[in-house]
Image (cartoon, rainbow, N blue to C red):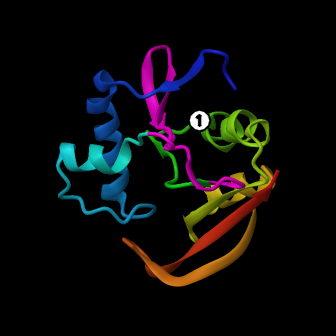
């Protein structure tokens, strides 16, 4: 991936652009179950993590391309992704660089964690599932009909796991 891609903690000045991305992804109705009617303040309260989580933005040439909402401690031994990554379109493959790889390398094994997990990956999100599998994640279960997909109706949510 490009060396000009920068991932840094989200700042107050980033929120307007992040909210644009948030609204567009939620409106698609294919990966998030948030209501489209969320105000900017309500969305921010849901999206921006305080410690022990971490909300960041991925930028290229100063433009925000996405926002990995990285991790929250479930137990000391396992790191959990609270939400998938929000990316603007087109994606250009930056999810691989700025998403799970960064977490695995920077806040996984180095901090003593034995594993990482995704609690809810929409089972029809084949691009994300393929990416996560390439990174070593496996699907350990599916919650049937847990997500109301805008085009397909009720579909499952996969729980994915990676042993570090």
Q: Tell me the SS state at disc 1.
A: loop
The quadrant of the image that shows the N terminus is top right
Q: Examine the rendered structure and indicate whether residue 142 appears above or below residue 84.
A: below
Residue 77 on the magenta segment: yes
Q: Circle 1: is it few (<14), some (14-19), or many (20+) Cα within 10 Å?
A: few
Q: Position of residue 29 (x, y in %)?
A: 36, 64
The residue tagged 1 is: 92
Q: Examine the rendered structure and indicate whether residue 1 appears above or below residue 109.
A: above
Picture residue at 20% right of the left edge, 55% below the top = 38
Picture residue at 72% right of the left edge, 70% below the top = 139
83 vs 150, left or right, is right
Q: Position of residue 36 (x, y in %)?
A: 23, 59
Picture residue at 41% right of the left edge, 42% below the top = 49
Q: Examine the rendered structure and indicate whether residue 1 appears above or below residue 157.
A: above
The magenta segment: 51-79
Please tell me in which quadrant of the rendered image residue 63 appears: top left
160 vs 87, left or right, is right
Q: Examine the rendered structure and indicate whether residue 158 appears above or below residue 26.
A: below
56 vs 6, left or right, is left
Residue 59 on the magenta segment: yes
């Amino acid at each position: 991936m490009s060396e000009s891609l920068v991932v840094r903690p989200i700042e107050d000045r980033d929120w307007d652009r992040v909210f644009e991305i948030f609204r567009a992804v939620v409106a698609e109705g294919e990966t998030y179950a948030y209501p489209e009617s969320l105000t900017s303040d309500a969305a921010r309260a849901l999206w921006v993590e305080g410690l022990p989580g971490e909300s960041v933005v991925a930028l290229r040439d100063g433009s925000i391309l996405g926002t990995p909402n990285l991790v929250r401690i479930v137990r000391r031994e396992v790191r959990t992704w609270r939400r998938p990554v929000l990316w603007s379109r087109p994606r250009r493959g930056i999810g691989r660089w700025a998403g799970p790889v960064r977490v695995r390398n920077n806040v996984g094994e180095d901090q003593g964690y034995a594993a990482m997990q995704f609690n809810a990956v929409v089972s029809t999100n084949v691009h994300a599932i393929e990416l996560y599998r390439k990174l070593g994640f496996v699907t350990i279960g599916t919650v049937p009909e847990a997500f109301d997909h805008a085009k397909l109706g009720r579909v499952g949510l996969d729980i994915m796991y990676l042993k570090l």
